[in-house]
Image: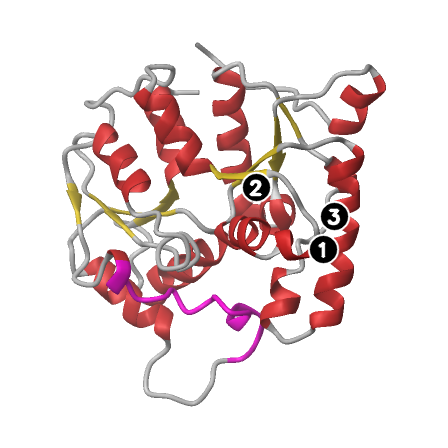
Amino acid sequence: MEIRNIKIPVMADLSAKGETPEFLFWVGCAGAFDDRYQKVTRAFAKILVFLDTSFAVLGKEESCTGDPARRAGNEMLYQMQAMQNIEILKKYNVRKIITICPHCYNIFKNEYPDLGADFEVINYLQFLDQAIAEGNLKLDPEALNNVVITYHDPCYLGRANDQYFEPRSILKKLTSNVVEMKRNKSFALCCGGGGAQMFKEAEKGEKEVYIERTEEALGTNASVIATACPFCMNMITDGIKNKNREDDVKNYDIAELIVQSLNL
């Protein structure tokens, strides 16, 4: 099934027609503005359309969740952004949100309820793993079977929300060649970009965190480092460039690997 030129429904347009989709796809700042992560947004959107999912995006009405502001210590800005988002979500009677960013997922799920938010938050890997388990998303186990993949656990999916099973379950449906880094799951090393660190200069030290983590990934001899977070993708990609390994090692999001497998 070819899905190239897809049209993404916008919440305001559906609301004007009296329609309410089952899911709001929260794109996030990186998914909207970062050239590299826009490819991940498109990949997941293709999968949603392929599955005939009832969803929409906010489009121009979407704003930052306030996660970077809160991590950087600007609580007032965070609460202003969060309350504005909550009002928009209530306006459209949003009950389920799917996120492709672990930072958005974490703050929606664990911190927005303190400000009166009341909706179900689903990380896209949970959604994808369930679709596979229910037989709605059938992956070809041979499509990437010549590719050795290692997976980097995002802090805000792993340690913050205990989501270790879903990404590995999906990857093992794509290839039998999944290898783990020395530090993985709850012991995984941060990419170095979390906690608003991606937006500031590195502090004094012998080695940057993203270099250390990239070295661990390269030590597995994997040709693909799979990620599931925009911050992780940014840092790991920089690490691959730092080691001059762009020609033989690639960094893909799990949604991108699924699209490659399905040839969407």
- Which is nearer the eye, 105 or 142? 105
Residue 26 in the image: state x and y as whole percent. Answer: 62, 39
Q: Mark number for residue 40?
A: none
- Which is nearer the eye, 186 or 5? 186
> How many residues crowd around disc 3 within 10 Å: few (fewer than 14), some, or many (20 or more)?
many
Majority secondary structure in the magenta region = loop
- Of mark 2 and mark 1, the one earlier in the sequence is 2
Spatial CA span between label 3 and label 1: 5 Å
Give the side of residue 87 with respect to residue 130, left or right.
Answer: right
Q: Look at the numbered disc 1 and give the secondary structure of its residue.
A: helix
Q: State yes or no: discs 3 and 1 in contact (Cβ < 8 Å).
A: yes
Question: What residue is rendered at 41% in x and 58% in y?
Answer: 160
Q: Amino acid at mark 1?
A: Ala
Residue 36 in the image: state x and y as whole percent. Answer: 52, 47
Q: Amino acid at mark 3?
A: Asn
Q: State yes or no: discs 2 and 1 in contact (Cβ < 8 Å).
A: no
- Which is nearer the eye, 235 or 136? 136
Residue 258 in the image: state x and y as whole percent. Answer: 36, 29
Question: Which portion, as a residue range, is magenta?
Answer: 186-201
Q: Which residue is mark 3?
A: 85
Spatial CA span between label 2 and label 1: 23 Å
Spatial CA span between label 3 and label 2: 21 Å
- Of mark 3 and mark 2, the one earlier in the sequence is 2
Question: What residue is rendered at 76% in x and 54% in y?
Answer: 83
- Which is nearer the eye, 31 or 166? 166
Say which quadrant the C terminus sits in.
top left
Q: Quadrant of residue 121?
A: top right
State which mark lies toward you, 2 or 1: 1
Q: Which residue is mark 2?
A: 38
